[in-house]
Image (spheres, grey):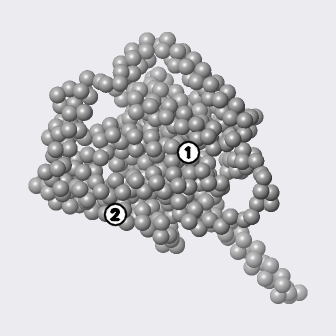
Amino acid sequence: MTASPDQTADVRVDHGTRNRALIRLISTFAIGFGVFLSGFVIDEPAPYELYMAGLIFIWALFGLRLSRTVAILLAILVIFNIGGLLSMGQMADLKTAPIYIAVSLFLAITSVFFAAVIDSDQRMLPVIFRAYILAAVCTSLLGILGYFDAFPGADLFTRYGRAMGAFQDPNVFGPFLMLPLAWLVHGVLIGDLRALPVRLVPILILTLGIFLSFSRAAWGMAVLIIAGLALLLFIRNPNRLFRLRIMLLAGLAVVVVLLAVIVALQIPSVAELFFARAQLVQDYDDAQFGRFARHWYGMLLSIDHPLGIGPLEFGPIYGEDTHNVWLKAALDYGWLGFVSYMTLTMLTLGLGLRILFRERPWQPFLLCAYLVYVAHVAIGNVIDTDHWRHFYLLVGIIWGCVALELRYNPTPARHAGDVRSDRERGEHSRMQ
């Protein structure tokens, strides 16, 4: 008995549907696994670099498309790295400069890649955030276990008595945990309170990891991000019950954190390092050739060298790196790199702020990423962030959301008087 034309068509449609579902499953796993690997950078090149290089190449072969917005991001980052190449030309001995610039260009491409992926499918946002949370929890646990020397060889995950997880530096480990912390706190503030225990466990793990990193920048970032998140949600939503909820939860969070810190300070080694690191200005900050003095010397040096002095050349001259991303841009990438980086920062801040409060399915993701990005811009004044993998992921998320906004076609609401807080909670629960 032969199949009818309608049955044959149904079989083709069914096969096509299954194939699309399989492709989407593979794509989702590939993106998520790449983000997960960003939390493990003990050696370089890290597995993240090797995996992402292959993933981007394969994605490009099968139709990675760049919208006009994403193309602008690519152009700015390419110009930034051209500045690095010009600066490298000022060096008599290239040393490791070519590898450094190659890594800079690669990280720029990852930022463009994530922006393009989000632009093509907004459903990748929850995939990215879930993978990031899993990576952050895993690397935090490694840092915590390493700090307390919980198993042989655990000191691999610490440095100078500070937790650093599967990173090379506690000062990178702490900031890496900010985006998942912001997302989980956002879920507590506007999500279903019945899910509070589920979110509370990873929040406590991340908070302890941040605390044991003894990174002053990470401590300040956590306070800024959580306070900013509560404030923006409070301002954005006029509902009195919602605002009361924000205030109560924020107060409860402060009490819990204070109690946790008090308990941790009962451990002598923790208390000693905490009070040493809690000083706003350390000896190496205000010494004759300390961090702040190097900022001044670096500024004078950048004025005399418009093409830069070459990547990583500042450290051998003054004994330490610039610890200032603006000086880093001017000295390692020249004036061209500095202007490009300034343009990237201003556009990212401006474009993100312009759409920050619009009712969109991706608004919760943008809100968290934007606050974390602002905190990274702030700490860029005292630390170099130009090679932080998660920093480029943040930029990609924000620019991806900007690209989504430019082609957003809202459907008319059935009821013009919908309550905003209900929509927020509904959107957040669906995207979780």
Q: State the residue in front, 275 or 166.
A: 275
Q: Secondary structure at mark 2?
A: helix
Looking at the image, residue 332 sits to the left or right of residue 161; the answer is left
Res. 123 in view? yes
Q: Residue at x 49, y 43 (%)?
A: 372
Pointer 2: what residue? 78
Quarter of the rendering occupied by the N terminus:
bottom right
Instruction: Report the mark closest to the observer, 2 or 1.
Output: 1
Pointer 1: what residue? 368
Looking at the image, residue 185 sits to the left or right of residue 224; the answer is right
Residue 355 point in image, percent of width and height: 56, 55
Q: Residue furthest left?
A: 92
Q: Earlier in the sequence, mark 2 or mark 1?
A: 2
Looking at the image, residue 90 sits to the left or right of residue 365; the answer is left
Q: Amino acid at mark 1?
A: Cys
Q: Quadrant of residue 153?
A: top left
Q: Residue at x 74, y 64 (%)?
A: 412
Q: Secondary structure at mark 1?
A: helix
Q: State the residue in front, 14 or 322.
A: 322
- Report the label total: 2
